[in-house]
Amino acid sequence: MKKLTAEFIGTFWLVLGGAGSAVLAAAYPELGIGFVGVSIAFGLTVLTMVYAIGHISGAHLNPAVSVGLWIGGRFSIKELPGYVLAQVLGGIAGAGVLYLIASGKAGFELGSFASNGYGEHSPGGYSMLAALVTEVVMTFMFLIIILGATHSKAPKGFAGLAIGLGLTLIHLISIPVTNTSVNPARSTSQAIFAGGWAIDQLWLFWLAPIVGAALAGLAYKFMSPEEN
């Protein structure tokens, strides 16, 4: 339960901090945070949680990360269902708090609520295929970063920086395409509130990140056969 509680809190923070920057701060052009600010915010949520709860649960904060770590031999499949449930519930809780805050302003409109999408719901109007490729590749690279930065032979104490900056870079690349998921829990939490099209397109933001993470787990085991 300590691990699951940590995953709940960590994913809560990821959604509240990352999606919160998009829903709240990015709504004001005069603040000037734009895509860059939102990208940094998502990276900071993971960076801070790696150091805050990494020693408790590993700070996965993401069902795809848990799957990739399992495939890569770093995580027990017995723990996988509990982690995924805690992450999804934490994300929903974060989105719920964000909704309570955002709706406290007169004239509030839910809109997309920072949901992930493709086609007409892609920020840049990118196709479903483009979104699928983007999410698979970005999640693949995210897991390569995580598996490498947390390897026993990697420099100690720097994993959080590599992972947080990696997620920032991923957002800088892919926000225009899908609004960046690489995390089914994050996508689910936003889609539940946005409803409609966001729910209809949610399948892609579960399938693609998990496929990308699984491929990364296999690739890293091939590249680094030594003990983790």
Image: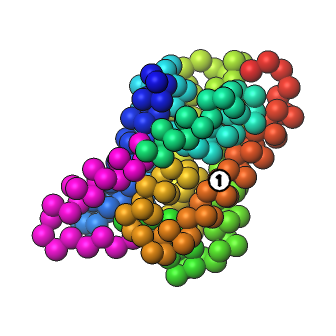
Residue 73 higher or lower than 168, as above or below:
above
- Whether residue 17 is visible here, answered yes or no, is no
- Residue at point 59%, 60% (across, down): 205
Is 221 placed left or right of 156 in the picture?
A: right
The residue that disc 1 covers is: 209
Q: How is the image coloured?
A: rainbow
The type of residue carrying mark 1 is Pro
Is 27 placed left or right of 35 in the picture?
A: left
Residue 125 placement: quadrant: bottom right
- Residue at point 55%, 50% (across, down): 183
Measured from the top left, where is residue 213 in percent x and y? 70, 46
Residue 76 higher or lower than 21, as above or below:
above
Measured from the top left, where is residue 177 in percent x and y? 57, 69
Residue 96 higher or lower than 103, as above or below:
above
Residue 65 placement: quadrant: top right
Q: Is residue 2 magenta?
A: no
Measured from the top left, where is residue 12 in percent x and y? 38, 42
Taking depth in this image into account, of 227 and 185 the one nearest to the observer is: 185
Residue 134 placement: quadrant: bottom right
Extreme-left residue of the structure? 106
Region of the chain picked out in magenta, as a range: 90-112
Q: Secondary structure at mark 1?
A: helix
Q: Is residue 101 magenta?
A: yes
Extreme-bottom residue of the structure? 120
In the rendered view of the protein, which quadrant contains the C terminus? top right
- Whether residue 65 is visible here, answered yes or no, is yes
- Residue at point 48%, 46% (across, down): 88
